[in-house]
Image: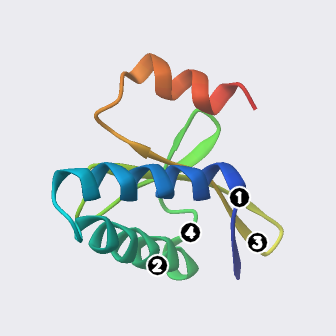
């Protein structure tokens, strides 16, 4: 299966890098490596996660983030990578306003 990270999800990753680098320089790079490894694991585990707002939701292993994706034909499309500490109403709006 091919993995396609959509522009909105790429922006989410960039926002996360900035956030963690403000906390401590270099942590943003660790955040990115960790989330990309989680996304890569979808090649094996896509479709086993809970459905939330019409997306599969995989929780990241090392950071409090969720990866929201859909499977279309043989393509895993990552639509969002969101901080789970955000207001649930904001998350719902973000995912349902597409």
* C-alpha separation, residue under disc 2 versus residue under disc 3: 14 Å
Q: Which residue is mark 2?
A: 41
Q: Earlier in the sequence, mark 1 or mark 3?
A: 1
Badge 2: residue crowd in 10 Å (few <14, some 14–19, many ≥20):
few
Give the SS element for disc 3: strand
Task: Determine the secondary structure under disc 2.
Answer: loop
The disc at residue 6 is 1
- Identify the mark at residue 73; answer none if there is no mark: none
Instruction: Decide which of tag 2 and tag 3 comes sooner along the chain.
Output: 2
Please state the horizontal and vertical placement of residue 49, each as a whole percent of the image: 47, 56
The answer to which of marks 3 and 4 sits earlier in the sequence is 4
Badge 4 is on which residue? 46
Direction from residue 17 to residue 3 in the image, left or right? right
**Most foreground residue, 76 or 27:** 27
Of the two numbered discs 4 and 2 on the same chain, state the one appearing first in sequence: 2
Residue 25, given in percent of the width and then of the height, sits at 21, 65
Q: Residue at x 76, y 71 (%)?
A: 75
Mark 1–mark 3 distance (CA, rounded to whole Å) = 12 Å
Q: CA distance from mark 4 to mark 1?
A: 16 Å
Q: How is the model colour-coded?
A: rainbow
Q: Secondary structure at mark 1?
A: loop
Q: Residue at x 26, y 49 (%)?
A: 64
Disc 3 from disc 4: Cα separation: 10 Å
Q: Mark number for residue 75? A: 3
Instruction: Give the SS element for disc 4.
Output: loop
Q: Please give the name of the residue rendered at 28% of the width and 34% of the height, measured from the top-left corner.
A: 85
Badge 1: few (under 14), some or many (20 or more) residues near its Cα, within 10 Å?
Answer: some
Would you call the spot at circle 3 few (<14 residues within 10 Å), some (14-19), or many (20 or more)?
few
Q: CA distance from mark 1 to mark 2?
A: 17 Å
Distance (Cα) linking label 4 and label 2: 8 Å
């Amino acid at each position: 299966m091919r993995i396609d990270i959509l522009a909105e999800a790429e922006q989410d990753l960039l926002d996360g890098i900035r956030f963690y680098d403000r906390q401590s320089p270099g942590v943003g790079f660790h955040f990115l490596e960790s989330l990309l490894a989680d996304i890569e694991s979808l090649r094996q585990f896509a479709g086993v996660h809970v459905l939330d707002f019409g997306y599969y939701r995989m929780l990241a292993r090392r950071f409090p983030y969720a990866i929201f994706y859909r499977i279309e034909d043989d393509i895993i499309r990552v639509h969002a990578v969101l901080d789970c500490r955000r207001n649930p109403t904001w998350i719902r709006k973000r995912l349902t306003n597409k």
